[in-house]
Amino acid sequence: MATEQPFFLIDDLHVEIEENEILRGVDLSVKRGEIHAIMGPNGSGKSTLAHTLMGHPSYEATAGQVLFNGEDILERDPNDRAKLGIFLAFQYPLAIPGVSTLNFLRTSLKAVKQEEISARQFRKHLLEKMDLLKISREFAGRYLNDGFSGGEKKRMEILQMAVLEPELAVLDEIDSGLDIDAIRAVGEGISSLMHPEMSIVIITHYPRILHYVRPDYVHIMVDGKIRQSGGFELAEELEAKGYDVLLKEVMQTSS
């Protein structure tokens, strides 16, 4: 009996920036409808992985492959990857004064889907997503992220994900810098968008958001490589022990 092939596969990925190797053989297999959390201390390579997946030009993949629906995407530019159905939520979303949230999202949807959508159709689509995420409609007319709080900026990233409806969402520390209430709002928003045809890779330093976005698998990244994988209980163990204790155990096991 043939085994189900993952629709997203990272195989022995090595990445360097300015000739300094950051990722040292990352392996990850994701099936449709799964949520994977990648955790690790600062400097472990988590954000490097996120930027590499979306094709940031500063990060050079020197070995390995990244397969999306069976195609190696490492030679594709960021626009092509977005058109294929991959989305990246940034750790530090940029403000764009002078560009309304509505116009930015409409332009993004047109670029990704490569089809026209009338202003009336798009407004209906956008407002439905804003209502689903419990985001005030007044944000549609405000300049994107201009004067927004940290929590509001991160919710705009989730709104963009909702509008674009990607097959794979990579969320790079979407919870960083947020207070408890904002983490809950962002986490519940992500969970409300999840469906069987979409997968999520959530990169986070803290386990708190995983109480709202419950992962199927948790992976611990250390020194540019995934060293341990498990279920949600691994995040709970990390929360109880802290990084210092757990990482000593992980490194002893993997050595």
Image (tube, rainbow, N blue to C red):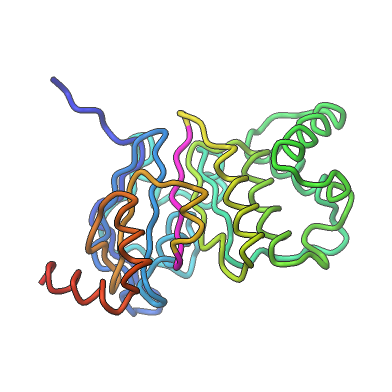
User: Camera-side residue: 97 or 247?
Assistant: 247
**Image coords of residue 118 (percent x, y):** 83, 28
**Image coords of residue 120 (percent x, y):** 87, 28
Q: Reply above or below: 32 against 90.
A: above
Left or right for 15, reference 101: left
Residue at position x 45%, y 49% in the image: 76
**Image coords of residue 10 (percent x, y):** 30, 50
User: Camera-side residue: 123 or 254?
Assistant: 254
Left or right for 161, reference 220: right
Q: Determine if the magenta segment contains residue 246.
A: no
Q: Main secondary structure of the magenta part?
A: strand
Quarter residue 115 falls in = top right
Quarter residue 137 falls in = top right
Figure quadrant of the N terminus = top left
Give the residues drawn in magenta, as a range: 198-206
Left or right for 66, reference 98: left
Q: Residue furthest top?
A: 1
User: Camera-side residue: 73 or 228?
Assistant: 228
Figure quadrant of the C terminus = bottom left
Residue at position x 57%, y 65% in the image: 91
Left or right for 52, reference 126: left
Residue at position x 86%, y 32% in the image: 119
Q: Reply above or below: 41 against 50.
A: below
Q: Reply above or below: 53 against 120.
A: below
